[in-house]
Amino acid sequence: MIVQSESPENIQDIRDLITLAFTGAEHSDGSEASIVDGLRADGALSVSIVAINADEVVGHVAFSPVSIEGVGAGFYGLGPLAVHPSYQRGGIGTKLVRAGLLRLQSLSAAGCVVLGDPDYYSRFGFKCDPALRFPDVPEEYFQCLDFSSAPRHGVVMYHKAFYGK
């Protein structure tokens, strides 16, 4: 298994993987591949990492800048995270997330937020932070991981690609 930054030849495989991984997922509206395409097109796909097994892209994670109260604060959003159904629950997602978080730290990021399963993301140090809010989502599903002690509070907004714009 190789974990590395995406390359141009991975783009269609990433799109196909994301579509497959989210097909039938309860929390999905089917837009995840379009989100990644939109981030890439706008130059907002800050970190994009793939897991490759025998020349097949079997996992992908994206990180993009978020704003807090309308201002860039050095924070990034994790997602989407996709693993091929045949490889799920085998540690690929964990490897991708850890590699991405290390990359963010090398970029001097202030922190990272994620909208997702608190049990899964807490293993990486994510936790609920009442100072940061994401509208219309139960508090426990929106979590933060700080890389610095920079003060911040308010409503977090993801890139417009997440909102279908």
Image (tube, rainbow, N blue to C red):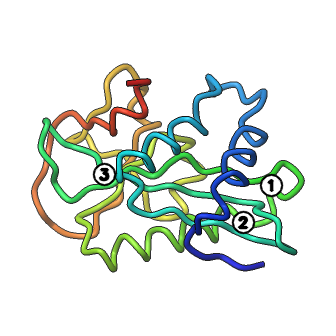
Q: Quadrant of the C terminus?
A: top left
The secondary structure type at the circle numbered 3 is strand
The secondary structure type at the circle numbered 2 is helix
- Counting every numbered tag in the picture gives 3
Between 69 and 12, the one nearer to me in the picture: 12
Q: Which residue lies at the image location 50% right of the left edge and 37% below the top edge?
A: 35
Characterize the local packing of mark 1: few (<14), some (14-19) or many (20 or more) Cα atoms within 10 angstroms: some
Residue 60 position in % (x across, y down): 64, 58
Q: Which residue lies at the image location 55% right of the left edge and 35% below the top edge?
A: 34
Characterize the local packing of mark 2: few (<14), some (14-19) or many (20 or more) Cα atoms within 10 angstroms: many
The secondary structure type at the circle numbered 1 is loop
Give the amino acid at mark 1: Gln
Q: Which residue lies at the image location 77% right of the left edge and 60% below the top edge?
A: 58
Q: Is residue 51 left or right of residue 160?
A: right
Quickly name the residue at label 1: 88
Instruction: State if disc 1 and disc 2 touch (CB < 8 Å).
Output: yes
Give the amino acid at mark 3: Pro
Which of label 2 and label 3 is nearer to you? Answer: 3
Quickly name the residue at label 3: 65
Residue 148 position in % (x across, y down): 20, 69
Query: Which disc is residue 92 wearing?
Result: 2
Q: Is residue 44 left or right of residue 5?
A: left
Which of label 1 and label 3 is nearer to you? Answer: 3
Give the amino acid at mark 2: Ile
Between 131 and 81, the one nearer to me in the picture: 81
When the figure is inspected, residue 107 is found, relative to residue 158, above or below; the finding is below
When the figure is inspected, residue 37 is found, relative to residue 28, above or below; the finding is below
Which numbered disc flags the more N-terminal residue, 2 or 3? 3
Q: From mark 1 to mark 3, how far is it between C-alphas? A: 27 Å
Q: Is residue 66 left or right of residue 93?
A: left
When the figure is inspected, residue 19 is found, relative to residue 54, above or below; the finding is above
Instruction: Place residue 102 in its image quadrant.
Output: bottom left
